[in-house]
Amino acid sequence: ERGCYSDKLARGIHQSSSRGRENKPMISVDCFYHNEEIDTLSELFSKSDSGTIFLENIDCLSRVNQEKLIEFLNHDGTA
């Protein structure tokens, strides 16, 4: 739900994980504001440097963009 501190919770989980302890980056993306930019996700994932990507408000993505994201994730970022 929007405004429920999910970003802070995700950041806490990241910081306590092995990625956080290794100072890997955490990138937060609010899908509410980036619905039309789904094609740039491959670039975003490549910039994550094996860190964490937190996709907030993923339900705000159109069905087409949700399908693109699922396909991308299912192909290890090679779609």
Image (tube, rainbow, N blue to C red):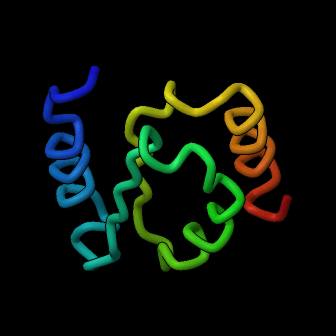
Q: What residue is rendered at 22% in x and 71% in y?
A: 21
Q: Dividing the image into 4 quarters, which one contains the N terminus?
A: top left
Q: Position of residue 71 (x, y in %)?
A: 80, 43
Q: What residue is rendered at 77% in x and 43% in y?
A: 68
Q: What residue is rendered at 52% in x and 79% in y?
A: 47
Q: Is residue 20 left or right of residue 8?
A: right
* Residue 46, picture quadrant: bottom right
* Residue 78, picture quadrant: bottom right
> With respect to residue 34, does 27 lie above or below?
below
Q: Residue furthest top?
A: 1
Q: Dividing the image into 4 quarters, which one contains the C terminus?
A: bottom right
Q: Is residue 34 left or right of residue 65?
A: left
Q: Is residue 1 left or right of residue 73?
A: left
Most foreground residue, 8 or 59:
59
Q: Position of residue 64 (x, y in %)?
A: 77, 32
> With respect to residue 78, does 46 lie above or below?
below
